[in-house]
Amino acid sequence: MKYMHIHTLGCRLNQAESDVMLQKLYELGYEITSGEHPADLCIIHTCAVTHEAEVKCRKVIRHTIRQNPNAEIVVIGCYVEKDIETLKNIPGIDLIVDNKRKMDWLPYIKGAKQKTLSILTGTTWELHSIRHCPSTKPITIPGFHRANIKIQEGCDCYCSYCIIPYLRGPSRSRDINDILQEISWRIQAGVKEIVLTGVNIGNYNFEGENLITLLDRIYEQFGNKARIRLSSIEINSLNEDFLIRMKDNDYPLVPYLHIPLQSGSNTILKKMNRQYEREFYRDFVLQTVDTVPDIGISTDVLVGFPGETPLLFDETLKFLENLPLFFMHIFPFSPREGTPAYSFPEQVPNLEIDRRVDLLIELSKRKRKIFYEKSQNTVRPVLFEEKENEHWQGYTDNYIRVLSRNPECLENKLCHVRLENIFIDHMNGTVLNIIN
Ligand code: SF4
């Protein structure tokens, strides 16, 4: 028996790709180890979205090499695209793979520690499809109840602060038949929630099929066998068609949206090269809450973008205070070499960025509490995933983390739960009945 360990950093898209790799490695005879057996193969799936992410990647790589001196070490993903030279100088790595070869490196593993470093890089992005990411029949891996399914790759937006289009290439959409096939296999393997994932999923377009027609095809084929969640989606890809579907109780699309805002100041949005104004964002969020009252909406905010004066930051703060959001991910701006914003004038001092981040984190906590209070004593469907300190843990359809004490095994069970006590990042609830 051979053992593997995979460490995935970064976004849900990386997670979806890691899942595909794990399945393929299963077919090659590898089992996952979480430390109980020494690993023969360690994969570090990297992220380079911020400077901090890069630091973390290097730390994880060095730690993995130290802990697994005899394992074959493979480093793949965005950090390879961003800074392969640094990686070449870290002793102990056996194989480095960039994003262009991300899905075809398995034949290159040797099954044992190597004396020399191998490097696998591509020259061009596959432009029109993601045919390098075909479906693999999933093997039931314990603990996989929510499946991230990659539907799209790359981005054409070129927001002025973002390195992603340079690391993952232009927008390409995966063959719809491949996606449906993978969903079918996942449902057969017992998965009860599908998360449609990509860099910019609103851009999905495969031979005339867009994200809405993809959702309808999933519904036609699988009905309510699994609930469907969208990963992050840009505001200008959304419209009423999504809301109508979320509102329909028979339709499997859950009432949850993560819509990155980044700034509540039109001056800053323009400098960021975001393709909307704050009024457009606000109007859609208000329309959404009006149409789907229980919806959970979260967002990303980038703080301290060059030129964000205290006055412009206040615009963002006030704008967010008045929006019915559930929670916010707050990112301090860090200049990424290779992006236009790297050399923008009027960079904001780090101490001031930290102050603004703290204010927004505080606001996010208040918003979460308001959302929890609104949900208190209501009944929602919760998909339980695992047991944590005597409590079963899962998420509602609108993405509230729920803990419940229950003598029965609730792993991978969808249940009606009455939401009761409020805690900082979750609610407690009582299971009323098991749906399936
Ligand atoms: S939409 Fe903008 S922020 Fe998002 S991946 Fe594309 S370029 Fe980056």
Image: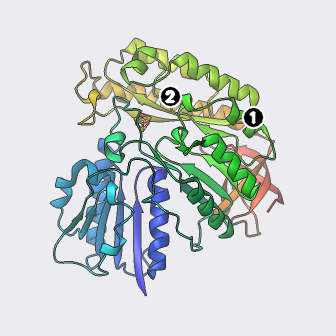
Q: Quarter containing ligand 1?
A: top left
Q: What residue occupies the far top of the structure in this picture?
A: 311
Label 2: state its secondary structure. Answer: loop
Residue 223 drawn above or below residue 367: below
Q: Quadrant of the C terminus?
A: bottom right
- Image coordinates for residue 69, horizontal then vertical, percent: 25, 76
Q: What residue occupies the far right of the structure in this picture?
A: 433
Q: Quadrant of residue 111?
A: bottom left
- The amino acid type of the residue labelled 1 equals Ile
Residue 107 drawn above or below residue 360: below
Q: Residues within 10 Å of mark 1 (few under 14, many from 20)?
A: few
Q: How is the image coloured?
A: rainbow
Q: Residues within 10 Å of mark 2 (few under 14, many from 20)?
A: many
Which labelled disc corresponds to residue 15?
Answer: none
- The amino acid type of the residue labelled 2 equals Leu
- Image coordinates for residue 284, horizontal then vertical, percent: 63, 24
Q: Is residue 147 left or right of residue 374?
A: left
| Label 2 residue near ligand 1, CB within 8 Å | no
Q: Nearer the viewer, mark 1 or mark 2?
A: 1
Residue behind mark 2 = 261
Give the distance between the C-alpha atoms of the residues marked 1 and 2, in whole angstroms.
22 Å
Front-most of residues 392 and 193 = 193
Residue behind mark 1 = 244
Q: Quadrant of the N terminus?
A: bottom left
- Image coordinates for residue 370, horizontal then vertical, percent: 67, 31
| Label 1 residue near ligand 1, CB within 8 Å | no
Q: Quadrant of residue 376?
A: top right
Front-most of residues 282 and 368 = 282
Front-most of residues 120 and 141 = 120
Label 1: state its secondary structure. Answer: helix
Q: Residue drawn at (77%, 69%), measured in percent from left and top? A: 408
Look at the image and tell me whether residue 390 can be seen.
Answer: no
